[in-house]
Every structure is written in C-alpha cells, then in structure tokens.
Image (tube, rainbow, N blue to C red):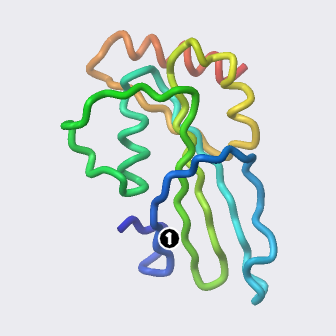
C-alpha cells in the first residue's frame, strides 16, 4: 500500500480512471471544516520511457516487473490515487500522456490546470534524451 504524508495519516488505494475531467478542488465532502484537494500531475516523456509502468506501480496495478508486453498509450490515461487525513481528503490524478508525436497537438489541452510534471526517460537510450527535449519544448509552449 502506498503512503502519502506522515506516518499512517493517509493511505492511498489505486484505481484506473476512465473519465476525463479537469482538475479542481473538491467541495463539501468533509463537514468538519477540513479541506478537500485535487492535484493533477502529468507524466511526460518519449515513447517506451516507462511512464505507464511508473503510473501502474503508483496505483498498485503492477509490481513494476518487465514481464509485460509493451502497449503504447493512446492519447492519455488518467489514474487516480485517493487518500484522506485527519483534516483533509486528497485526490492525485496521474495523467499518463503518450509520447507519440501523433498526439502532440493534444498536449497543450492536457496540461491545462496541471500542478505538477514528472519527466520520464531512459538515460541508457541516447535518442530518448533528444526526444525529451522535443516533448518538453512542445509542452512548454
């Protein structure tokens, strides 16, 4: 089980999210004056860098072993981590964005309202270092 925060105040359970919606604060779920938070984090990088593997491990859909066949992400996958503490409820949306240039026209829309970016690439592959510069340049514009 993944933990976020200090000690055992927050426990996350993973679950794939199939519906796309913008990141926004949650409202009214905690009647004791606590805060509800939603955070959108993008996983970006070239194809076959390991973005989906990282996302799957974080939401406990995989143990990270390499015995799974490669399946390229088509567009974007959204996975969700949920947890709650004493005074808040938190949701982290992991947006696993395809590194395929065919989807690059969608990247500006996907980054809307993102609070974080994780850049993933394979340092053992010299081409991926160049590809990540291309991906970042497209995302940063």
User: Relative to 98, is 94 above or below?
Assistant: below
Quadrant in which residue 49 is drawn: top left
Residue 132 at x, y percent in the picture: 48, 19
Count every numbered label the image shows and give the total: 1
Q: Residue at x 77, y 55 (%)?
A: 24
Residue 125 at x, y percent in the picture: 30, 16
Q: Secondary structure at mark 1?
A: loop
Residue 87 at x, y percent in the picture: 66, 82
Quadrant in which residue 101 is drawn: top right
Q: Quadrant of the N terminus?
A: bottom left
Residue occupying the far front of the picture:
18
- Judge left or right: residue 28 versus residue 70: right
Q: Quadrant of the C terminus?
A: top right
User: Relative to 15, is 44 above or below?
Assistant: above
Q: Of 100 and 18, which appears nearest the observer?
A: 18
Q: Residue at x 48, y 58 (%)?
A: 15
Q: Residue at x 75, y 89 (%)?
A: 32
Residue 9 at x, y percent in the picture: 49, 80
Q: Residue at x 53, y 49 (%)?
A: 79
- Judge left or right: residue 134 versus residue 61: right
- Judge left or right: residue 26 versus residue 16: right
Q: Of 101 and 75, which appears nearest the observer?
A: 75
Mark 1 Cα-neighbour bin, 10 Å: few <14, some 14–19, many ≥20: few
Q: Of 81 and 21, which appears nearest the observer?
A: 21
User: Relative to 36, is 116 above or below?
Assistant: above
Q: Which residue is mark 1?
A: 5
């Amino acid at each position: 089980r993944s933990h976020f925060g200090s000690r055992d105040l927050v426990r996350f359970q993973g679950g794939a999210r199939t519906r796309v919606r913008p990141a926004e604060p949650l409202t009214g779920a905690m009647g004791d004056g606590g805060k509800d938070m939603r955070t959108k984090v993008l996983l970006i990088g070239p194809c076959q860098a390991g973005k989906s593997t990282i996302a799957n491990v974080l939401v406990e859909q995989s143990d990270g072993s390499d015995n799974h066949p490669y399946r390229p992400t088509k567009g974007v996958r959204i996975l969700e981590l949920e947890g709650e503490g004493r005074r808040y409820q938190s949701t982290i949306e992991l947006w696993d964005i395809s590194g395929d240039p065919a989807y690059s026209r969608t990247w500006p829309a996907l980054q809307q309202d993102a609070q974080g970016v994780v850049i993933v690439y394979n340092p053992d592959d010299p081409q991926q270092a160049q590809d990540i510069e291309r991906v970042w340049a497209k995302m940063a514009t």
